Image (tube, rainbow, N blue to C red):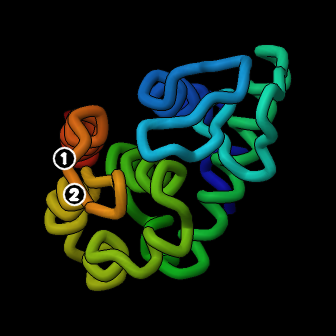
Amino acid sequence: MSRVRKSAAFAAALIAFVGTWEGLSLSAYRDVVGVLTICYGETAGVKPGERRTKAECDKGLLREIERHEAGILKCAPQLAALPDGPYLAHVSAAYNIGVHAWCGSSMARAVRAGNVAKSCDALLAWNKGRIGGVLVPISGLTNRRADERRVCKGG
């Protein structure tokens, strides 16, 4: 069962964590790698010049977090048994990189193998973005992954 739906307190903590890292923009903009983005990092179907209200963004963030949570639970059902810290960190990472990328990652392999510490450390590898065709470290992602790792390790 969805931990986000089961616990309002956990959902609020996850929304606050993801929302802080994603930031809020009520108008569509191009992110650092050029992808049209709106609200809290939403990219699907965003159109140039699009605007949304904060309430629409908040509702969309919750919906997308639940979708990403469900997706990673399908490929790594072992995640459900993890404490809140690692669970929150991995859902946050999946929201940022996508379910497909998370499910194929070393994070997911470590979760499936039952190695929580290794799954937390594997978060740090996901700090790059493609700019001008080249994969480069992005300081905001480096900081986010360090914070996710801190939370994952019980911080």
Determine the image quadrant of residue 49.
top right
Q: Residues within 10 Å of mark 2 (few under 14, many from 20)?
A: many
Tag 1's secondary structure?
loop
Q: Does residue 100 show up?
A: yes
Q: Earlier in the sequence, mark 2 or mark 1?
A: 2
For the N terminus, give its image quadrant: bottom right
- Does residue 53 appear left or right of residue 65 in this picture? right
User: Where residue 151 sits: x, y (%)?
Assistant: 27, 39
Which residue is outermost to the front?
132
What's the mark number on residue 120? 2
User: In this orientation, which residue lies closer to the viewer: 15 or 155?
Assistant: 15
Question: What residue sits right under mark 1 in the picture?
Answer: 153
User: Where residue 13 sits: x, y (%)?
Assistant: 51, 28
In the displayed structure, 40 sits above or below 100; it is: above
Tag 2's secondary structure?
helix
User: Where residue 99 sits: x, y (%)?
Assistant: 55, 67
Mark 2 to mark 1 CA distance (whole Å): 6 Å
- Does residue 154 appear left or right of residue 62 in this picture? left
Q: Amino acid at mark 2?
A: Cys
| Residue at the spot 69% in from the left edge and 36% down from the top edge | 61
Q: Amino acid at mark 1?
A: Lys
| Residue at the spot 19% in from the left edge and 54% down from the top edge | 124
Q: Does residue 154 show up?
A: no
Q: What is the count of numbered marks? A: 2
Evaluate if marks 2 and 1 touch, with contact meaning CB atoms under 8 Å apart: yes
